Structure formats: C-alpha cells, structure tokens
Image (spheres, rainbow, N blue to C red):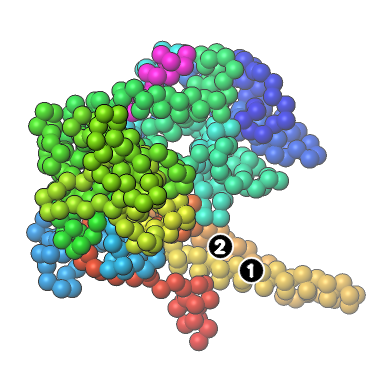
Amino acid sequence: MRAYGWSATPKLTTCDTLMLSRIVLQPGFRRLLATVKGEPHAARHARGMAVRAVKSEQYLDAPFSKWPLLPDHEDDAVFPPPPPPPSDKQPTWTQTAAGTHVDVTRRIFCNRSLNMRSISAIGFDLDYTLAQYRPETFEVLAHTETVKKLISNLGYPKVLSQWKFDWRYMTRGLIIDKKRGNVLKVDKHKYVKIAYHGFQKMDRDERLATYNTSNMRFSFDEPEFAMIDTLFSLAEAHLFMQLVELQDAQPGLIPPGKDFFTMYRDVRAAVDLCHRDGSIKQQVAADPGRFVHTDLRLVPMLRDLRAAGKKLFICTNSQWDYTHVLMNYLLSGKVGKDRTDEWLEYFDVVFTGCGKPGFFQAPKPIYEVQTATGLLVNTDGGTPMAAIGEEQTQTPAEGGSSAQPVEVAPGGKARVFQAGTYLDLHKMLAITSGAQVLYIGDHIYSDVLLSKKTLGWRTMLVIPELETEIRILLQNTGITQELLQLREQREILDDAIEHLEWEEAWATAAATGNGALPDTGRREREEKLRRLQGERDDIKDRHKDLLDQHHKRHHAVWGQLTKSGYANSQFAHQLERFACVYTSHVSNLTFYSPYKTHRARYNIMSHESERNLITAL
C-alpha cells in the first residue's frame, strides 16, 4: 500500500492482500469508499491495488519463469535494426553525383543548423555508437549476469535464476519510479500517459491520482526517478519490473527490509558488479561477433573524415582493454591473438575510462596507456612523467601542467589516455572553442546534454530504433492523416455542441424572466444536441482506437518512441533540445559531404501554420 501514496504503511501478508482485494472489489464497498469525503483518490488506489493483487494470485505457487511476452513480429529479430551493409542502391557521398537522394532511414535530421566546415574535431562514443550490440544476445547476457549477482552477492532467492528476459519488452525514453515500483511513459509536458506497476498496467483513474492530479508536481529527476535513456538500461529496467511483481505476490522471498527503492538500488549495484568483475565484457571479448554487429561503412567514414582534415577522437567510459577488443573487431575483423593496434591509425587521440559525464565537468588526473601492456603511466597534463632512474622523453609545456598538442603523421597511431578531462582533450587537439567539436553518442545525458550545455560542443545522437520508426510511419501515412482529420471534426462538433448548450441556457433564463413563456424550439435543440453528441462520441472513440492502433504498430506496450499519445514524448523533447542532429547509425555520415551545412527545418508556431492561415483567409 505504501507504493501508492497512502499515509499509513501497514505490513500485509499475501493472504491479507488477497482478502483485502476480495473486499474492495465488492461493488458496495467501492461505492462506500467513493463517497467518503475527501478520499476519492484513496478509493481509486485501493481498487487498483486490489485488481493487481488478484492478477498476482496466479503467481503465488509459480516459479516466476514466465512473464508477459510481446507478440511475434516480422521485425523482432532485428530490432533495433543493425547497421546497413554497403549497397549499390545507397552509395556513399564520394561515390555519387551531386544531388543524389539519401534514403530517409539513412538521413541525418537537424534540430539546430550545423556547418561541418566549422567543425575541426569529431569525437565518438564507443558503446551503442561505433559498436552496436545485438540485443537478443548482449541484453540477455546482461540480464543473466545481473541476476547472478543479485543471488550470490545481495541475498536474493535462487528462484530468480529461472526468470526469462524478453529483450523486446522495454524501450528507452521511459522513466522508472523507484519509490512506487512503476515504469512510466511521459510526454514533453511531464504528463504521464502510460504507467505500469510491475507488468500490470495502471488504469486511468489510478494513474491520474498518482501523477497527474496530485498536489505536488513531479520533476521525474533523481533520486526518486531514473531515466531509461540508453539501450544499456533495458535489461535492468525489465529486471526491476520482475522484482516488483515478486515483491507484490511473494514478499517473503525478498530479503528483509527491502522496498521498491532499495530493490532498484540493488539492481544498479548488481549491474556495477558485472562491469567491475568483467563478467559481461569477458564473454563479449571471447566472441565479439556473437554480441556486436559489424558495420562495413565505419572504415570508409573514418577515412573520408580524416581526408577532409578533421581530427578524430574516441571518448568512452570503457577501459582500454575492452575498447581495444571492440575496435579491432569493428575496423579489421580481428579477434583473439590476431588483434593489433593498427586501428589507432584512424584517430588522433583516444580517451578511455573517461567517467562521463564527469569528463565534461570536474578535472581529474590523466594517465597515458601503454597499448602493448595496458599499463598506465603517470602524466603531467598528458606529458609522461619520468620515473626515478629514467630520462624524461618529452618536455612539459611551460607551467608544467598543460597538455601538449598531438600530431599524428600519416601512418602514425593515436596516443591513448585514461581519465582526464575535456581541458586535456581541447589542448591536445588545439581546440579554442567548444563549437569546433562535434561529439557523437547514444546517451542523452552522458553524451549529449552536458557536453552541449557545459562546453558548447555540437552534438549528434545515434538512435538505431529510429530506422524502424521511420519505416512504420511510411507504411501508415494514411493513419496519421485520418487522426488529424478526426481531431478537426471533433473540434467543429465541440463548437456546435457548446453553441446549442449556450442557446438552451439562454432560452431557459429568458423564459423564466418572462413568466415562463413556451419555448417552441427546445425539443428541436435537444434532438440536435443528442445527435451531435453521439457523432462526437463516435469520433472520439474512433480517434482513440486509431491512436492506440498507431502506437501498437510501433511497440505493443509503450507505443511510438518519439510520441506519448499525440504529443512529443519526454525523450523526443530532450532530443530536440540537446541534439543538434540525430540519425539511426553513426555510419550514415558516409552519405553526406564532410563540409555539408545541415540546416534545421523552419520552426512553425501554431499561429503560423499553413492550415490556420488558409482557414483565416
């Protein structure tokens, strides 16, 4: 009960919960609760909790091995879609004549105009940017290893090992309510459109009572909430939903003293343990082809950008050993003992273990990586410091703490560093203004938001799911048009109904003031009003059903990534605000000139829309 905002937090057993559910579901009790003065929300909360308790009863004696699965779909095996292979149907920019059409799924979309001639350095994140993982293997591995840590390190029951993970179930852009055990889909106005408690969808009354009509306006920020803003978070979000279900149905299996908030903290701790002991990355390193897609356009992209005079760098939170494994596989297909450091020829400098977003804020010591051994060398602002008994091979800059510019000769290799800060990077690449840097990543907060707000870097967000969304939109353009038409028809009917209601109220007042003279038009108005209200209700139902169908075409549970209802989602809102440009795959850069000016679309306010102006004329 504490999960739904009740002031009292009694400890209920499973039997108590089921008994309460059977009482609350009685119609007479529901009416009694609904009539208690000042407690309409409590009635809604009790009813919602009771429904979920009944649904959870089926799990009381089950091993929790089965969870809601999405219906099979022809695109499931490749969602998000992998990077596209080279094709004569879509040649690169250097292979085409001027004005060649770029397929819409390969385009770079622009929120803020970006002149690539003003960009002197281009940086890349590694995970889910240069390296796109296979969710059907990588996310399943992440879920499995996290469950192992919960059992072995954090005292959770072994029954968790029987749980299955549907990697298609979650999507990014969602928000986890850690306190209440809910997962939310929010629009740009912070209106909660969809809410699930575990795998049970909250009904409209309960959702409104919890989030949209409360006295407190939620910001949906930490520490109470967590944003699912990277594909890395999908497995842990799904696991949290499973734990919520277990806590509701069989609380005795959860370690004592755990509530939803601490369970989420445990999930995050288990994920961190997986990264710390290498249980995930070691398996990826052993067989990268099983977990990572190849992208044959990466090498041509890097070559073209360097030929255009751009300085290239990597800025990743991954350590050197893992970065080395992935970049060998991605750029040369080399694995195991065949790995070399030849891939460093494509870059000017590589920063590993950056600790983003801290890399964009607080200064940290910087170490140089000896690529042959992986050992770290102390540096003074990037200049190696000689150990006792060794000679200084480089001369520190005046002042003794400034990083030195890096110059990579043709055929030379980038130097590799660990940690450090953006100041070191700027000095190494002779960056005098943040606007000279384009940084490309997949994480709204760690890659895009802070680098743009704090440093003024230009930003590109990589969204593999965008390709699928565009294809579905192209297949269903008629639905979008019908939704717009239905909204217009409903607006016209609303206006007509309001006129009739006003006429009725005016006629009633006039008749009362004139000695109750007969109103000859009343019956006609009432009949017309009933007819119009019926038409409006039909259109409203048709619009709702069509909008639901539209969203289910994108995702059976959460709908279209960039929409919440008919408004932009919170994810889309952040995308517009903080990503100068965005695209489905980083290698889509090969379809554009490295000197191109990407121009933002003309912003149109409601009063400027062509439809409104035509109507006015």
- Identify the residue at horizontal 34%, vertical 22% (top origin): 277
Quick check: 192 above or below 335? below
Which label belongs to residue 497? 1
Q: Where is residue 30 in the image (x, y as percent from the top left)?
A: 70, 33
Q: Element type at marker 1?
A: helix
Viewed as shown, does residue 6 lie left or right of 402?
A: right
Magenta-drawn segment: 140-156
* Residues at marks 1 and 2, CA–CA distance in whole angstroms: 9 Å
Q: Which residue is drawn at 41% across and 31% down?
A: 236
Asked if 252 appears above or below 569 in the picture, the reply is: above
The one of 353 and 520 positioned closer to us in this rendering: 353
The residue nearer to you, when weighing 61 against 87, is 87
Helix, strand, or loop for circle 2? helix
Q: Mark 2 points at which residue?
A: 536
Mark 1 or mark 2: name the one nearer the start of the chain.
Answer: 1
- Type of the residue with mark 2: Arg
Residue toward you, 542 or 596: 596
Which amino acid type is marked by label 1?
Ile
In the image: residue 217, left or right of residue 353:
right
Question: Is disc 1 in contact with disc 2, using a CB cutoff of under 8 Å?
Answer: yes
